[in-house]
Image (cartoon, grey):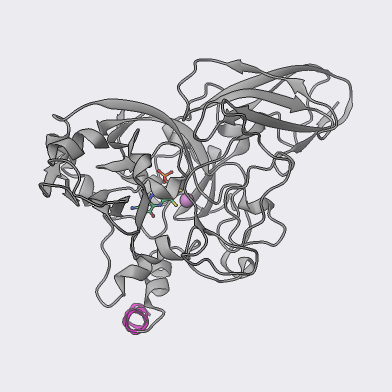
Amino acid sequence: MKENMNISRRRLLASAGGAVAWASLGGVAMADDTTTPASKSNPGPVSAEKPLPDYAKWKNADSMIVHSANTIETRRTAFGSSGITPLDRLFVRNNVSPPAASIMDNPGAWQVEVSGVVKPRSFTVDELKTLGLASVAVVMQCSGNGRGYFPHKPSGTQWTVGAAGCVVFTGVPVKAVLAAAGGMAKGMAYMTSTGGETIPAGIDAKTVMVERSVPLSAMEDAILAWEVNGEPLPLAHGGPLRIIVPGYTGVNSIKYIKHLAFTKEQSPANIQQNSYRFSPVGVKGTPAHDSIWEMPPKSWINLPSDPKQPVKAGKVQISGVAMGGMHAAKTVEVSIDGGKSWHAAKFVGPDLGKYAWREFVFQADLKPGTYELASRTTNTKGQKQPKERLENNRGYINNSWLDHAVKITVA
Ligand SMILES: Nc1nc2c(c(=O)[nH]1)N[C@H]1C(S)=C(S)[C@@H](COP(=O)(O)O)O[C@H]1N2
Ligand SMILES: [Mo]
């Protein structure tokens, strides 16, 4: 049996479908890179029976929905109310299987190569720690968060709200690393990061490598991080070292970064050229379509949100999270009648900066009955969370307030 698997593995690796085969042998369908219909690649959102994979065993199982070994979502009722997502409840998403746990044996010795600079060189994490120190609270959110609400059932993980969390990363500003490498070489337009996954021989690297380019403007607040929420960055979240591109969707924040390059062009990797592109429904992404980079304003209600748990009539604290994308969330409104009327909600807890989300609450006095709860936010630039999603083939960037509304029963 085992031998047969090895034989077919070798065959698959030698074939054109090798890349996909490698990913699935690692326990995943390459959700964001295949064109498999949703019905085939995704059995649906709730799969409570699946165990947490070894590299994420330390997660709080009751708080998570395990879609697959590489796609693990936070339950809507499990975010907590402090505005910071506890690490053991933070979602995990890997496009391909993560590297071996042994890369965490000596995190200080992990090396990142820096190129497209005046003095190209490598830095160990220990060396980076001498160059600067910065902390930033960010919403880490998968580009496909909310994909489960698209009616055309895009292929990929059917995330609802939980492919997102707000955490504090600590590391060194990319700008300080750039200065230590003599500044940028002339004519560069992108900051390109490469993940530390080992790509098996026989596969065209471009088809599977996790390498993303973002415009140079994204460097402003970017850091190379080795710590999250005060803890050493675990493998599941990109340890020993990860780039954090605040305000951008998760895919742009490359884990276990092994190469940081300033480049004239965007990465030739498929994940840059054709995946994570905003293309019309039914049309595959190409370089001609917009890349999925900056996040728009978005909010949703977390509590109460369980349709199976009737809420006690009387005073109810309706709470959730609001993020502003590239600019701070400024106001949030809550509706209890499916968006017919709106009420101002209040922010709760500290303001952790423009890239963080903020907890909000609206206190309602509810009589027995059913209610449709929704929220919508506006950021400091006046950008509003829309009622409708923007349709696109792969179901990216869903910030529709209507899609995120929840029906509750008050008894
Ligand atoms: N090296 C590498 N970096 C990666 C990925 C990956 O597969 N490999 N996945 C990206 C995607 S799609 C997301 S949403 C985030 C998820 O980060 P998390 O697992 O820490 O929540 O990591 C990004 N960085
Ligand atoms: Mo993602």
Residue 321 shown left or right of residue 177 in the figure: right
The residue lying at 29 percent from left, 54 percent from top is 195
The residue lying at 28 percent from left, 48 percent from top is 256
Residue closer to the observer: 370 or 345: 345
Residue 387, above or below 19 = above
Q: Provide the major secondary structure of the magenta segment.
A: helix
Residue closer to the observer: 356 or 160: 356
Task: Give percent across and percent down for residue 324.
Answer: 55, 31
Task: Give percent across and percent down for residue 94.
Answer: 41, 54
Q: Residue furthest front?
A: 187
Residue 121 shown left or right of residue 48 in the figure: left
Q: Quadrant of residue 231?
A: top left
Task: Give percent across and percent down for residue 61.
Answer: 50, 41
Residue 368, above or below 194 = above
The residue lying at 49 percent from left, 58 percent from top is 276
Write down the region rendered in magenta.
Answer: 1-14
Q: Quadrant of residue 344?
A: top right
Q: Quadrant of residue 370?
A: top right
